[in-house]
Amino acid sequence: MSDVDLMLQFLVQIIVILSACKVVGWLGSKFLGQTQVVMEMVTGVILGPSCFGAFFHDAQAWVFPTAAIAKIGGVPVKHPSMTVLYVIAQLGLVLYMFTVGLEFNVALISKRVKGVISVSLAGIVLPFGLGAVLAVALVNGGHQDLFAPTVSASEAALYMGAAMCITAFPMLARILVERGIAQTTMGTLALGAGAADDVTAWALLAIVLASYKHDAKFALFAIAGGTLFAILNFTLGKRLMKTLSRGVEDGRGLAPGVFLTTMLFLFCGAYITDAIGVYAVFGAFMVGAAMPRGQFVKELRNRIEPLTVGCFLPFFFVYSGLNTKFGLLNSPTLWGICALACAAAMIGKFGGCTLAAKAAGESWRTASAIGTLMNARGLMELIILNIGRQQHVISDTLFTILVIMAIVTTLMASPLFKMILGHDPGKTVRELEGIPEPVLAVSTA
């Protein structure tokens, strides 16, 4: 395949992906009250073999040629356009997690330490336990084929537990920011607990991969290396970036050289964490979280976020959707397992976090709203599922089951959140917490 043909193929993929995301996002917003990023998850599945491929097989295979084009040493070789699509998807993911880090205020967690710890623990222990029990039941019940042949029952339990623990932290942050309640007690509690849950899930994943590779040093290296990187990032790295931000804070704007240096920090962080086994998205998030707050962060977001969210991120959802095959669930038993996975995920996360928030002193209304947000898996779940599939821990069938679980729990979040807090959740939360409405300036011109 020539470079020109590859470029034309990739341009066709860009047109199809962005057009589909635009249409599905508009329909989801107008008729379902869903956010754009949630509908992009759905778009990924629609463009995959389960929908587009089922009705227009030849067209789907032409746009997204997933079949191997050759074999080298017995190993199938992917079509080069799919390799390009994968690289762009990962780039979009890294940039997006950096923007999420820019929005995350570490200082907020210290204001609600007790609540954050209790909700986070509940959001880890209960869903992890249910996921582990389900995995062991599947392995011992004759469904070992849902995992790789070499995966033991304990490894399967750890992986399923980690998958159930995850929270859609980027989506959670976006909902809270869009509703204007990120700085409220409820917003602080949800953000802190969501971040803690995801960090724990990544640590569990490192342990799973270490066990699967029969190398305890892998987990030790990942966890110790990740901890060291976090310390250096929030000390030395933060000081360096604060020095670079002075020109912006003085009103001179974000100079090209400063922007380039910031991008260098970002991609170095992503590379380091990926190399030690914590994965690039975690490094990107931490670098973003360490950026000095103020005008500097606003300038960075204004430059990076529109292109990332509007163009790059949809490629990750579509790449995941191409590996989601509903046709693999070809028996009532497998659909029953899918229903059990969804039920375990919802009971563990929503139930556990709601009860913990209530025990921390929140009202039932606020507690159930927090439980609803924590129950969404979204983007972070797709990341952990893709890693499990790429590392050959889970089969394509289990991958599909858990993608369905991620979509179901994520689609539930926005409608339930509005149902609990009303059409204007931001106003409701401010009323519940006694926060006065912002006063709008009246023009006298």
Image: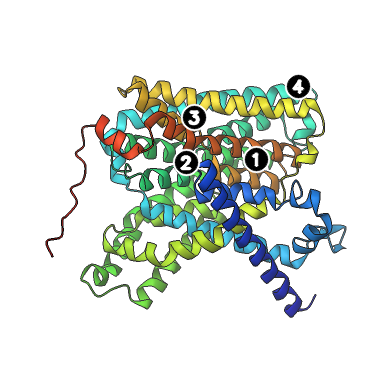
Can you identify the residue that label 2 sits on?
Answer: 199
Q: Which badge, 2 or 1, comes first in the chain's sequence?
A: 2
Please name the residue shown 36% across and 47% down the image.
Answer: 177
Task: Residue under label 4, please give it.
Answer: 140
Identify the residue at image location x=55%, y=38%. Answer: 411
Q: Which mark is residue 403?
A: 1
Q: Is residue 199 left or right of residue 157?
A: left
Q: Looking at the image, do the residues carrying marks 3 and 2 touch, with CB atoms under 8 Å apart?
A: no
The kind of residue tagged 1 is: Val
How packed mark 2 is, by other alpha carbons closer than 10 Å (few <14, some 14-19, many 20 or more), is some
The residue mark sitting in front, 1 or 3, is 1
Residue 232 in view in this figure: no
Image location (x, y in percent) of residue 366: 35, 28
Distance CA(mark 4)–CA(mark 2) = 30 Å
Q: Nearer the viewer, residue 349 or 162?
A: 349
Label 2: state its secondary structure: helix
Q: Nearer the viewer, residue 282 or 92?
A: 92
Q: CA distance from mark 1 to mark 3?
A: 19 Å
Contact, mark 2 vs mark 1 (Cβ under 8 Å): no
Q: Quadrant of the N terminus?
A: bottom right
Q: Quadrant of residue 146?
A: top right
Rendering coords of residue 202 (x, y %): 53, 42
Q: Secondary structure at mark 1?
A: helix
Query: How far apart are the alpha carbons under marks 1 and 4?
Result: 23 Å
